[in-house]
Image (tube, coloured by chain):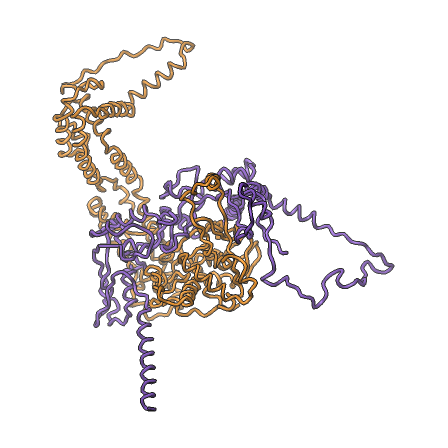
Chain colours: A orange, B purple
Amino acid sequence: MVARKFRHHLSLARGRLTTSSNIQNIYNFYKYYPDRVRLNTMYQQLFYAKRDLRAYHGEHITEKRFKNEWIPQLNSVSKIDSENDIKTISGLIAKNDVKMTPYQMQTFAFLEKRLDFAVFRAMMATSIREARMMIIASGVTVNDKYIKDAGYKLQPGDIVKCDPERVLRFMGTEKPNIKESLKVDAIQVSEWREEVAALKKDPSGYFPQFKFKIDGLYEREPKRIFIESLFKEGFKKQQKQQYDLRKQNDDVSIVAKILRVLETDGPSLAKFKENFVSSDELGNKAQALYNKYISNIDLTKFGVIVSDGTIKSVQETTPEKKTEKIETISHEDIIKSEEKAHASSEDGIVSKYLEFSTQLLKDSNNELVRKLKDELVEFKVAYGKEIEKNRGVDKINMDWVDSLVEHEVLPEEFKEESFADLEEADLVTKEKELSEHVKLPWQTGYLYGRQKPEATYFSPWKPRGFLGVFAIAPFHLEINWNTCQFVYLRDPICRPGHSEVISPFGLDTHEKAYLYYKRMLKNKKIRNQGFD
Amino acid sequence: MLSSQSNKISAVTTVTTKRFARNAAKNVKKPRFHYNLPEKDAHDVVTNKTLHISQLEYALRQFTGPKDYRGDFVYNKYYFPSVNHVPKYLHCSLEDGKPLRLKQTGEILEFPRPETNVVKPGFVQKAGRMTLDSVGESSSKFMTKITNESEIKKRYMTESDRVTFVPRYIQPFPLNPYCKTNSVVSNELKNVIRTAVNEKKLPLLTVSSKLSLKVNRVEAINKLGEIEENLRKTKILDNDMEIFGQTMYGMFPLYDPIHEVQGANGARILMNGSDDLEELPGLKETETSKFMTVTEGDDFTNLDAANVLFLEPADKVIELLKLKSQQTEQDKLAKLKERNIVLGRKYKTDRFDMQFIDVKVGETGKRYGTGNRDNKKNRPVTYDINGKKIYK
C-alpha cells in the first residue's frame, strides 16, 4: 500500500507532533502545549483530538484505511491485590494507591502489532517512515523470513532481525562528503598541533586548560576516550582520595581526628594543620575547638589520654616467644590474635577513635558538647570548601606527554581553496592518498567519519543528534541492540496507572479521539459493543 | 433596495475572509516561553548575507545553539545521548525554554542573536509559565535567578507526577503521565539467566518467579543471547555495532535485583523493569454491567460474582496461566504432531490409489453462495478461561 504524502508535518507554525528525529519536530515537542478547546463545539473537540493524535499514530496511513482497520477493543489487565480485596469486602474504603486504569489509551493499540511500528519502537529506526523504508527494501526478517509488507501483523514470540547496516545509518549521524571531512580534518589537525606544542612547552601549566577542553566533549568521542586513557590511573587515585575526604566530613570523624592528634602528638598547631588538608585556617579552627570545648571535657572517661607534647616513650613490647605447641592453639586464640592485628593496623586505629568520638558526642546533657556541635556546623562548611579547592589537577603525573608525537603539517590539498572547484567524484579516487596524511592518534589513516569508505553510515559510529530525547524502552518488546534483533513478547496493554502504548498525548485527548472513531463506525453492532 | 442588499453581501464576505486570516494567525503554535524576534536588517556573520528567516525559525536557532566545526550543537544539553543510565527527556517547563549549557560546569547559556554566533551567560528566572504540565510543584521556588543546571537537574530527578507518581526522569512526555520507559535488563543479569537456564538446567518458571520476569521474557533473553553468542563466534559483529549497542544500553535505566547497578535506580524505580506475575487479563464479560437480585441477608462475594459470569476464580486462572506459560515450544510442537493424524476411509480400486466420490452438499464443506462471515471483522467473539480469543 502506498503511503500518504508527507506534508506539513514538520511545520513549526502548525506544531504537529510526529515520529521523526528532525530538529523541527523536536522543537515542536519542546514548545508543545495543548490547544484551548473549551469554547469549541463537541464535534470540533473530537475532531481536533483525533487530528493531533493521528499525526503521531500512523500518519502515513490514509484515513479511510485507518478507519477500516480500527477496532473499539480496549485490552487491559487487572492487578490482584489481596489486601485491597479484603478491605472492599469488609466495607472499608479501598487504598488510595489504587490508580485509575487508562482504558482509552488503547485507542491506537492495534497499530502496535504492525511490523513497521514494532521496528520503530525497538529503536532500529528514528521514524516509522524509515522503518517502512527498511522493510520494503528487504532489510527485516521475521522468524528468518524476509517480509516486505510494512503492515504485517506480528504475533507473540516472533523474532525480528534488522539489517545492521541500515540501522546504523538511520540511528547515526549522516556520513560526511569528502569535502566536508577534509574541512573538519584541517581544523582538527591544526588544533591538535597547537595543543601538543603547548603541552610539551609547559605540561602542568597548560593541563588544567586542556582538561577543561576535553571535559566539554561528548563522553564517547574518540579523542576524549584516547586522552582520558592516558591519565586515567593518576586521575582515578586522586578522585578516590577526594571521595574519601568528602565522606569524612561529618561530626564524628572530625572529632575522632582531633582526638587522635591529641593522644599521639598533643595539641600542636602543626599537627592539626597536617590532618586537615594542610590549611592554616582549618588548623587554627581545630585548635580553637580544642581550647574552647574539648580541653574542658574530661577525656579520660572515654579512654583518651592527652599527651603533653613531649616525645612519647615507645613501649617496647617483648616479642612473644613461640614456645606454644601447635596442639595447644585453640580457635579462640586465633580470633584473639586476629583482633590484635586488626587493632594495630591503620583501619583499627581509625575505628577506635571513631568509637571514642561517638561516645563523646552522645553525651548531650553536657553543655560543652552541645556547643561543640553547633561550632562544628561552621567547621564542616569550611572543611568542605577546602576539600573542593584542594583538587588541583596539577598534581597528576604528566609523563604521558612525552609519548605524544607532533603531527606533520597537512598538505595544501586539505585547504578549501584547492578542493572547492573539484567535484565529489574526482575526490573519490584521491581519498586513499589524502587519508594517509591524517595521523591523529585516535584517527589514523582515514578521513573524519570515513573509516569505511564503502559503508553508507558514519564510521566509527556516532549517534544522531537528539537521539536520547525519544529513547523510550517499550514494555512489550525484548530488544538486543548488539545484534539489532528483538522479540515481540505480546500486544501492549494497559493496567492501573500505566499504559504500554507510547504516546505524547494525555488521557483526555485519547478519550475524545476514541469517541470520534466510535461514532464514525458504520456497523451499529460494533458501535454498540465494547467499552463506552 | 437591491443596491443595499448587494452592499451587505459584500460586507459579509470581507468580514469572513478577515476573520479567517485573523484565526490563522492565532493558530500558530508559538512557544510559551520568551524568545527573541529577528531584527529588520539582521546580517549573518557566518554566511555574510542578510537574514531571511521566519520568527519561529529564528526561535529554533536559539533553541539549538551554534554549530561546532564538526556540525554538532555542542551547547544543547539534549544533543548527545546520556551515558549514565539516566534518560534525557525534554523538560521545557523546568528550565523555561533555555536548554543551552556549558557542559563542564553546567552554567546556563543563551543564544539571543543567532546571526552573531555569540553565546552569552544566561539565567532562568521562573519556570511556572507552563502550568498545564501536571508535573511539578508551584513556581514559588523559582522566583530567584538560577544560573546553574544543578538546581534544574535536582528538580528533574526528584519530582514525580501527581496522578500516577511516575518519577519525572522516566516519564518521556510531560503531558502523558501514563507513559514511562521500561528499564533494560542489565548485561550481568542476562548472563545469570543464561547460565541458570542452559548450564544449571533450572526450569523457566523458577527463574522467572525469582527475578520477577515473565516466562516469555526470560525465554526471549535466552534466545537472543544465544544468537548473539553464535554471531560473536563467527565474528560478524564489528566495532561499529559494538559502539551502537553500548550507546543504546547507556541511555536507559537498568533493572537488576541481584547486582548493584549504575545510574539513578533509586528505590522509586527499582521495580520498574519487573513484570507483575499475578496479573489477570481483563475479560469481556466484566466490562459491561449486569443486574441481578440478591436477597437481603445474603453476602455477595467475588466468588459469587465469578459464578454469575461463568468464570473461574482469579487464583485458579493465574495458576493455569502460569502452567501454560511454562510450556516450551517443543511441547507445543509435540502436541500439534499428535493432532496431525487424519482419519478417513481408504477406497481401493483396481487402477488408481485416489478416486473422486460424490457427496451431498451441506454434509461436507460449504454450499457455494451461502453467507460466510469468516473474514468479517465483526465476527462474534468470546473468551475462554485463559483470556484467549475464540470465534463463536
Taking B387 as reference, is A169 above or below it? below
Q: Residue furthest front?
A: B296
Q: Residue furthest bottom?
A: B2
Give the side of residue A464 with respect to residue A299, left or right: right
- The residue drawn where x is 41% and y is 62% is A18
Q: Is residue B233 in sight in this rendering?
A: no
Q: Is residue B6 in sight in this rendering?
A: yes
Front-most of A459 and A251? A251
Q: Position of residue B255 (x, y in %)?
A: 43, 43
Q: Quadrant of residue B346?
A: bottom right
Q: Quadrant of residue A170?
A: bottom left
Q: Position of residue A81 (x, y in %)?
A: 47, 41
Front-most of A423 and A26? A26
Q: Position of residue A319 (x, y in %)?
A: 29, 12
- The residue drawn where x is 34% and y is 66% is A12
Q: Position of residue A59 (x, y in %)?
A: 45, 65
Number of dots carrying numbers: 0
Q: Residue furthest right?
A: B350
